[in-house]
Image (cartoon, helix red, strand yellow):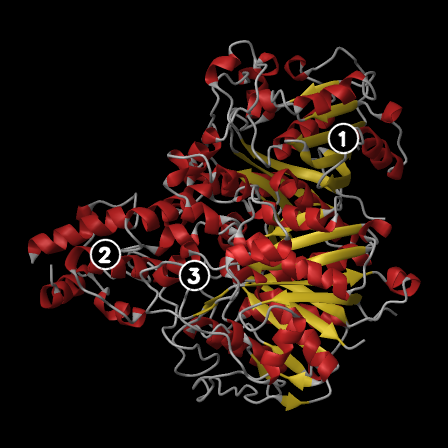
Amino acid sequence: MAHCYINGIGCVSAQDTSDYKTFLENQFELTENVVHVHKPNYRDYIKPAMSRRMANGVKNGVVAATLALREAGIENPEAIITGTGMGCTIDSGKFLKNIVENDEQFLTPTSFIQSTHNTVGGQIALGLKCKAYNVTYVHNATSFETSLIDALLMIKDNETNILVGGIDEIGDYSLSLHQLVGYVKEQDTLANGLLNSNSSGVVYGEGAQFFALENQKKTTTYAELVDVEIYDSIAKNDVEAKLIQFLKTNNLDVSDLDLVVLGNNGDIDFDPIYNDLQNSLLKDTQQIYYKQLSGEYLTVSSFGLWIASQICKTQDVPEFLKLNSKKVTTIKNILLYNQYKGESHSFTLLCSC
Amino acid sequence: MSKGVAVTGMGIISSIGNNLEENYQSLVSEKQGISKIKKIKTIHKNVIKVGEIDYTNNELVTLLGLSDSNNYSRTAMLGELAAKEAVKNANITDINKYRTGLISATSVGGMDMTEKFYYSQFKETKNRKYIASHDAGDTSKKIAESLGITGFVSTISTACSSSANAIMLGARLIKAGKIDRVIVGGSDCLSKFTINGFKTLMILSETDCKPFDENRTGLNLGEAAAFLVLESDEVVKNENKKVLAYVSGYANANDAYHQTASSENGEGATLAMQKALKIAKIKPTEIDYINAHGTATPNNDHSESSALINVFGANVPDFSSTKAYTGHTLAAAAAIEAVYSILAIQNEIIFPNLNFETPITDTLLVPKTEVTKKEIQHVLSNSFGFGGNCSTLIFSKA
Amino acid sequence: MENLKQELKAKIIENLNLEDFKVEDIDDNDSLFGDGLGLDSIDALELIVMLDKDYGIKISDPKKGKDIFESIQTMAQFIMDNKTK
């Protein structure tokens, strides 16, 4: 049976994640309610002829993809699978604004072309001249996980390497609408840290994380991606049962878990879903969270996967991620659980190898 | 050996019919659905023609029994209508008797509402409910919820090849045993955003589009939704289902040539067709009918023609583009054309490529221009989108 | 005509986001598409809109762009011959 290994990762986030050591040395809990990425030097990765049309979000995706492939030593992947929750909001906002403000006159094509959801996947393929399978999932907070599920299907079907990523960008217009309806946390509630904000809404973030998955282990291998499951909705109080079931299908029990990576984002309306698990089923499991470093965006679980992969490789859980004081000596089985506004649930299982 | 993944139900709404039967009747009576735009206020209304569905949004709300507080975009409403027809057509009474999922596709999502209320959102609250339904995923969520599907639900957005990829993923999930049953397809409504977008690319025709014609000037945009129900062999057997056709082949390749234009020699399209034939384990000579992408843009039809010749050589099978009937329905295109492909198999009819007069000088391919009776075992359907996305599906007789 | 040519160079750099270029870098007779400045069909569409918006010249057939936009020189000449603004 084919196994799927994470052999390369590229991460562009609110932190300096150019490499893990730099991240550990410089990481900080976010204090602003709207956070943009720590920008890489785009010129190092993208030719001016291509980058001139790209919004920063697209550039972030291309950079992260390049880094992942480089690390794994892959020149041309056999598939490029991208997840994005909101798509290219910068360009779609721009084109829409132009339509409305100029009454449909003198419109130019670039921002329309760049606004299609599959722009990042398309640009990566164009840059690599990669003619392989290319697809983009745009489904709320399971966009990235659907990409992983697709990749796992391919690995099991004898493909050897796949590039998978999650990307979302902050567009001014989308941000203003989301602020209108209370998706974004009020700034003054963050004075005492994300989990003490006692308020609804999230730290509005953006980022791009890409993973080079292969059916062979390499010296660069971080972890094995074992399984991914998504649920569009789960009845209240049924999350625990679904978690147990997911582990069971992988011949595991909660007691086999060495680490659980949770998606707590400080939203008082929906963090209780995590808290319930933390205080009952997972109370004896080492728990960490990460959105205090990344903010929230619909594909942020890919940042969670970056963190989990690093932990798997280094076998060390940084203090600043911990939600409880449980400790284990060896980290073998890692579960990631994420949801957004009580929907779009995902379970991801990693194991060290 | 399995013939592929079984299709047990279909549903569709387009500018040529509000359900399966109406669509079929229009196809065989050569009744196209292209006209001047009626429901959207746009400065281009006199210089474009579209495939617009008759129902107003209010009528759709009534048809679906939605409450006043609903925040459905037109995309979601069209999608739900088609998905419900498909589920009914498949005689499904208990959706959760088996592991059932939904994979939809859209490019517009809720943009039709976002653009409508662009300024008013900041002045009044009554339309802010549509902010939550802007993203592509929300349309699928609504459709899934209305059908009672809570497990595997996803949305694909790869421009004009979107619903082909949805059908493909559904088939692969069933083959891998990950799911027993999946509703797959797509939906897109007309919007100012897409009308203006395509206008800036200068590929909209001012008249009825002419796929594969030397004098074609561009496409007509359209709106539509269509879904197929795919079920595993086990479900088909247990429930004694009638199989309408099989999804026997599928492939996705990337042209990697340009962001919006297809390569002259149609490389991505060629790769997609070749791979789909390989998956279906059939030879090019076994294809009886091709439902082409055939948008009637100068670029696509030339590129696709080159690709057809690459794959089929001197023996390009009978082919037609049905976009002269419905317009180019973007993310829904592959889904409605999947329905038409299966209708072709079931009724042993090739639907004509309307408005064709003169073959393209470089390639000289001539599509079928009349309703033609023919026994059809295998249909190949193409859908190509921006970002170089090329997808091909093959449907085979049950 | 000289002013127009300089103006066109500045507009091309701005509208097409050619970050690495300055007006002095573009020669009047440099090939704008293909091997010269490396512009492509999307840029051609952008320039068609610019001709309409800034000079009142409407081009309905995108294929005509190839000749008009061959170089700054040909663009400027075309505008001088056809402008309505």
Using the rendered view, name the quadrant where residue B230 is placed. Answer: bottom right
Residue A236 is marked as 1
> In the picture provided, is B273 more to the left or to the right than A225?
left
Badges 2 and 1, same chain: no
Q: Quadrant of residue B397?
A: bottom right
Is A116 rendered above or below residue A183? below
Judge by depth and name the residue closer to the eye, B67 or B145: B67
Q: Quadrant of the C terminus of chain C?
A: bottom left
Q: Count neighbours of disc 2 (C-alpha within 10 A) and say few if under 14, some if 14 to 19, many if 20 or more.
A: many
Q: Are marks 3 and 1 in contact (CB under 8 Å)?
A: no
Compared with residue A218, is residue B20 higher up or lower down, i.e. above or below? below
Disc 2 and disc 1 in contact, CB within 8 angstroms: no
Q: Is residue B182 visible?
A: yes
Q: Chain of mark 3?
A: B
Amino acid type at circle 3 is Lys
Closer-to-camera residue (B257/B331): B331
- Residue highlighted by disc 2: C50
Q: Amino acid at mark 1?
A: Lys
- C-alpha gap between disc 2 and disc 3: 30 Å
Front residue of A197 and B31? B31
Residue B89, how many percent across, how many down? 75, 66
Chain of the residue under the numbered disc 1 shown in the image: A
Residue lying furthest right in this view? B238
The quarter of the rendered structure image containing the N terminus of chain C is: bottom left
Question: Residue sitting at 61 percent across and 40 percent down?
Answer: A140
Residue at (79, 28) in percent of width and height: A237
Label 3 belongs to which residue?
Answer: B39
Q: Quadrant of residue B151?
A: top right
Q: Nearer the viewer, mark 2 or mark 1?
A: 1
Mark 2 is on which residue type? Met
